[in-house]
Amino acid sequence: MRLSTLTLTAAACLAASTATASPDFTDWTLVEDPADPNMSAVATATDATLTAGPGGVAAGVDIGYQSVDGNTVAGSTSGFYFDPSSPFELAIDYDLSFVTASGGLGLGFGIGEDGAGVNSAGAAILTDSGSPVPFFGGAARNNNVTIPRVILLGATLSGSMFVSYDAGEVTVGASTTPGAASATASTVFTTTDLSAWTGADLLASFFLRSDTQPPFVNTPWGDGDASAVFSNFRVLAGTPITLAALDGDANGDGSVDLLDFDILAFAFGSPTALGPAGGDFNNDGNVDLLDFDILAGNFGASSPGSVPEPASALLLVAGTLALGRRCRA
């Protein structure tokens, strides 16, 4: 899964009740593209720390977090997202520090329709051997085509990044002040720039990336000790939507259907330590008729974007009767 494929930006890198965005970064999903022994991450309730070094990292390799557990909102079962039919604005603080540094390293924050960065936009900074390139950058990807922009503000190693969405337009910006309420400078990507965006739900992400951008940075991260701390994620406008696991969705595919019934039938009558993933929807330590009641009550339900299996409740009842015959044999 790609977390960031933008030039100087975050790839944006969320059934179904509205809620305040969680400040707990342990609820975000770690993404490594690909995993590299010289990059690591740790998240706490209040911040997430991404590190590079010691040792070199190939250009384009990144690590970070995104707000859902799948590549798209439709393919996710947990996390949070934003509905593009309503405007919203997000911000996050960052603090990038170095003990020693050699080569290019960037960090960014953005939104997008997918974790692969096909349709995404964000703001970022790029550094060369520990020193920031003189300006913040912004970029969008429109069906994998990059549109780079300069944010007319001198880049610093700590501050705030901003991204907002309104009626198909994305504005990305930055401030050199952590905790800032608004961007000091920004750039706008219009509906023409983003013509390939499909109107899908939008997830958020942030990342640390080994990068080159000639003539500013000519070599990727080579060696050293770098640490990027992201904190104070905030929703300045709009309402995030939480993705809640569906009761009865034993296989986590976003639909309660006969595949989940099969899992329940196989485990019926046995103690389980797997919880809902093993059919124990009420977490009482056993797969029993109470769990069948939960599945039957939610049969046919689905998360946003998933396609329920075309099966009727009659088939479910018939299967339950068959299970009863097997259990009595």
Image (tube, rainbow, N blue to C red):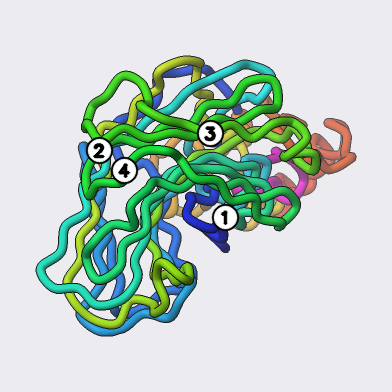
- In terms of sequence position, does the residue under pointer 2 or pointer 4 come before the other? 4
* Residue type beneath disc 2: Gly
> Mark 1: few, some, or many residues within 10 Å (few <14, many ≥20)?
some
Q: Does the segment drawn in magenta span residue 163? A: no
Q: Residue at x 53, y 20 (%)?
A: 88
Q: Position of residue 84 (x, y in %)?
A: 66, 25
Q: Position of residue 138 (x, y in %)?
A: 50, 45
- In terms of sequence position, does the residue under pointer 4 or pointer 1 come before the other? 4
Q: Does the segment drawn in magenta span residue 253? A: yes
Seen in the picture, residue 152 relative to 20 is either above or below; the reply is below
For disc 1, the marked residue is 267
Report the quarter where the N terminus lies: bottom right
For disc 2, the marked residue is 159
Secondary element at image label 1: helix
For disc 3, the marked residue is 187
The secondary structure that dominates the magenta segment is loop
In space, the residues marked 3 and 1 are separated at their CA atoms by 55 Å
Question: What's the magenta region?
Answer: 251-261
Q: Residue at x 59, y 34 (%)?
A: 246
* Residue type beneath disc 1: Ala
For disc 4, the marked residue is 154
Q: Position of residue 135 (x, y in %)?
A: 37, 48
Which label sits in the foreground, 4 or 3?
A: 4
* Residue type beneath disc 3: Thr
| Image quadrant in which you'd find residue 90 | top left
* Res 299 seen here: no
Q: Residue at x 83, y 43 (%)?
A: 309
Which label sits in the foreground, 3 or 1?
A: 3
- In terms of sequence position, does the residue under pointer 2 or pointer 3 come before the other? 2
Seen in the picture, residue 15 relative to 71 is either above or below; the reply is above
Q: Position of residue 161 (x, y in %)?
A: 37, 36
Which label sits in the foreground, 2 or 3?
A: 3
